[in-house]
Amino acid sequence: MDFKELVVKALEPALAGQLDAAAIKSLIETPKSSDLGDYAFPTFSLAKIMHRAPKMIASDLVGQIDVTPFEKVKAVGGYVNFYLDKISFAHDVLKVIAQAGEHYGDANIGSGNVPIDMSSPNIAKPMSMGHLRSTVIGNALANILSKIGYTPIKINHLGDWGTQFGKLIVAYKKWGSEDAVKADPIKNLLHYYVEFHEKAEANPELDDEARAWFKRLEDGDEEAIALWRWFRTVSLAEFNRIYKILGVDFDSYNGEAFYNDKMADVVKRLEDKHLLKTSQGAEIVDLSAYNLNPALIKKSDGATLYMTRDLAAAIFRKEHYHFVQSLYVVGNEQREHFQQLKAVLLEMGYDWANDIHHIPFGLITANGKKLSTRKGNIILLENVLRDAVGLAKQQIAEKHPDLPNADKVAHEVGVGAVIFHDLKNERLDNFDFNLEEVVRFEGETGPYVQYTNARANSILRKAAIDPAPEVALSDPAAWDVLRALGDYPSMVLRAAKEYEPSVIAKYALRLAKAFNKYYANVKVLVEDSELPARLAMVKATTQVLTNALQLLGVGAPEEM
Ligand code: ARG
């Protein structure tokens, strides 16, 4: 059920020999105001080919096409405006949604594995708001891609290797305590790490010690490995607590350390292809042909690097998962890193590097300032989520004091609010985080969408009869809701194509707003002949809002 197709079909015979169906479809626009119709076909590009005025072409077209499927077709300037037949549109949309249910919006477009590198926090550091972004964007993309036929593989590429572990071991051995780490692992490990940086500024010898300990770790020294493993285990236990709160799981936790035994092979492949050059003692791949800085493969002390591990990971993912696309949901500040990664793989002769896509995103700021873990200027994610749930609980207690499952609902609303706020912003935009605003029940928030859904559900509970999508719905006040309902499948496709969950979040807001406006103007439960159809529309609204929230990884409580 794609109403654009009706327009394409109507235009096709008249434009035969000039534009094919796909070309016609790609030209069709959705007018800003519904006064100008539901679809508009611009004739400007035709005018260039035909050497005729757009206005003339538009009015000629209106005379040539079969207008019976439409309420009306009108030429306005260089556009042909199509007004859908509202009653049959309503009927079709409501029937399709009632039949498809939770599968409304599914499509069979893609197939094959799509590894999604997401979340990927660093061991012994708190998960930051940046990692939250990667987690929720990655999770939403996995949901969206799986709706259209792909098999997503969610990979948590943990930052569990690197020179920072040398620093941490030094700091722990000098001023750490086992009891403190056990009592509050990440908080204390972070504390040691921050302290290390403070002290190393005055005493650079600490950095030498840290390098030596990292070398011991890379060489498999028992004490170093035992400490590293312990830090990793306690950190992961804390991360998992947060993932549980967010309702996100992973198919793999293969982090950077997983590739240790695969590094020699990568270096060998690079050598065999004569790609390695020595520069100031380090091994690099020159990427000047790509206008990029050289990729650092091996440091002068032999230690391998972030890039080397990502090369090993990319090759492993291709050989292990045979991916059709490989995504990396990682902050925009790592843009060059992923450009280099692709360039090196292309140099190695791997054409599939073109199927690798970095999915960058912007920063979350607090009062306009960037958050960083190193200086201790961080927001602890778990606290944010806990506070969000607390705020949700207060508001629910005011609005609905006798709500059953109030705690569960407060969790879905509070956590959902944080996730929704993140996803409604276009990925690349930076945005400020203010908890009170995020958890508000009005405005462009997750709770607003959830509340709309709950309100629609309560109408259905109050109704004395069942919804019936086959009954005609002619009320013009319903039109914006119906149009929004009909648009959902194309939104899923667009979100997938652009790797942009905000398309779905913005869509959910649009549908919720249209529904609330309708509800404010129309007495839904009045007993007249259209009541079953109105109920069908209310039901379709709950279905589509629930589907959209599910794609975003946000709960849709039936009451709140
Ligand atoms: N651990 C890194 C960080 O926090 C992100 C890793 C992203 N994934 C990757 N394959 N490089 O910055």
Image: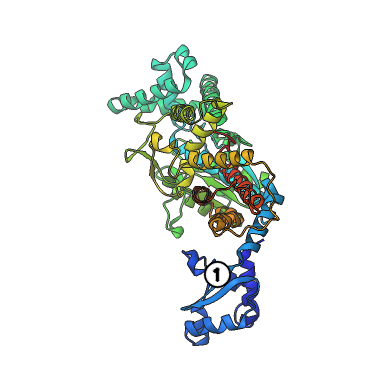
Residue type pointed to by label 1: Ile
The residue depicted at 45 percent of the width and 32 percent of the height is: 163
Out of 457 and 173, give the one closest to the viewer.
457
Q: Is residue 12 visible?
A: yes
Name the residue carrying label 1. 28
Q: Classify the position of the N terminus by image quarter.
A: bottom right
Expressed as whole percent of the image width and height from the top left, the position of residue 530 reads 64, 54
The residue depicted at 54 percent of the width and 66 percent of the height is: 38
- How crowded pointer 1 is (Cα within 10 Å; few <14, some 14-19, many 20+) is rated as some
In this picture, is 448 found above or below 105? above
Expressed as whole percent of the image width and height from the top left, the position of residue 271 reads 55, 48
Q: Residue furthest bottom?
A: 51
On whether ligand 1 comes within 8 Å of the CB at mark 1, the answer is no
Out of 475 and 487, give the one closest to the viewer.
475
Q: Classify the position of the C terminus by image quarter.
A: top right
Expressed as whole percent of the image width and height from the top left, the position of residue 395 reads 45, 30
Q: Residue furthest front?
A: 527
The residue depicted at 55 percent of the width and 70 percent of the height is: 28
